[in-house]
Image (spheres, rainbow, N blue to C red):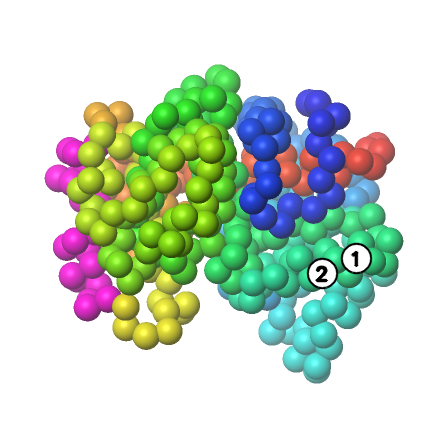
Amino acid sequence: MATTEWNRRHILSLEDFTAAEYDIILQTAASFREVLTRRTRKVPTLQGRLITNMFFEPSTRTRSSFELAAKRLSADVLNFAPGTSSLTKGETILDTAKTYLAMGTDMMVVRHQQSGVPQTIAWELDRLGAQVGVLNAGDGLHAHPSQALLDLFTIAQHFDPDAPRTALLAGKKIAIVGDIVHSRVARSNLWSLTACGADVHLAAPPTLVSKPFADAFASESGSLSVHWQLEPALENADIVMTLRLQKERMSSNLLPSLREYHQQFGITRDRLALCQPHARIMHPGPVNRGVELSSEVMDDARISLVQTQVTSGVAVRMALLYLMGGGKSVA
Ligand code: ASP
């Protein structure tokens, strides 16, 4: 696995990632995917290194996936839980990070409900001269890079299981449907998919996506369109990414009702007939069954990539930790 072209200590946003960097990640993740099929699904790559998971916001998939990825790389893992920590006694987040730094943490995986917290921790660690990488595991509405990267890997692998690479996405029609404006997953995917040359179509009610929102992600490589109806986004789509309605981030009633949303934007088997015959459905989870997509669609392994996304997540997160740790000598 070549790490020579990788020179990022932190992964905070995908805004300035290049296609070459995405290809390094895809290639590295494909190697780790192979490791995960072996009888002993573990490599000694990060033996003796310490990874601290700092999740200030609830998480099922992402936290477990990072923990498993670190363990499969033989790293030691600390899991910080805010409810039982000194945060409840008034300790600041930066002091918490410095505490884990003093214990010898090599990488911090940070999730927070406020945008910018992982960046602030990274700045502070850099200011202190610590050679510690920070990986943003989801901050507010801002970014969720590892989710978008596992989505990219899942899509590329769907088109070519043996050689997943960015070129496979060029010109592919990818519909992103749902609560786009509140979604850090959508934002990160917009950077990566357009940089890889995909033809991205956003579909949501006008309260959940706007044209100025999309303009911020304009790219020279891919194209981006906004629709306030589902059908034009689904027509001939290769991939349909559905997004959860983020009720916890909605400040007021932006939808008449969940039932009405499902009637207009829910993905059902009938609606999939508009897409390419080989089209696949994705969702980052957690899913509101019967709202963003019907249970029938979600559970049909012939069309749903939802479980594949979870499996891909471990290989991709192994790749990210491996690449971020690549600057140091590995036993
Ligand atoms: N799990 C993803 C996130 O943390 C998506 C979601 O919560 O809807 O952003």
Mark 1 CB within 8 Å of ligand 1:
no
The quarter of the displayed image where residue 26 is located: top right
Q: Is residue 273 above or below residue 34?
A: below
The quarter of the displayed image where residue 273 is located: top left
Q: Which mark is residue 125?
A: 1
Pointers 1 and 2 in contact (C-beta within 8 Å) = yes
Q: Residue furthest top?
A: 162
Q: Give the percent coordinates (x, y) of residue 232.
A: 20, 40
Q: Give the percent coordinates (x, y) of residue 101.
A: 81, 58
Is residue 259 inside the magenta stretch?
Answer: yes
Task: Kindly tell me whether residue 219 is visible in this rendering.
Answer: yes
The amino acid beneath tag 1 is Leu
Q: Which residues are magenta?
A: 255-275
SS under mark 1: helix
Q: Is residue 28 left or right of residue 300?
A: right
Depth check, front residue: 299 or 146? 146
* Residue at x 26% of width, y 37% of height: 300
Q: Residues within 10 Å of mark 2 (few under 14, many from 20)?
A: many
Mark 2 CB within 8 Å of ligand 1:
no
The N terminus: image quadrant? top right
What's the distance in space between the residues labelled 1 and 2, CA to CA?
A: 6 Å
* Residue at x 22% of width, y 38% of height: 234
Q: Give the percent coordinates (x, y) of residue 274.
A: 16, 34
The amino acid beneath tag 2 is Ile
Disc 2: which residue? 121
* Residue at x 84% of width, y 53% of height: 130
* Residue at x 80% of width, y 64% of height: 98
The C terminus: image quadrant? top right
SS under mark 2: helix
Q: Is residue 26 above or below residue 270?
A: above
Q: Give the percent coordinates (x, y) of residue 322.
A: 69, 36
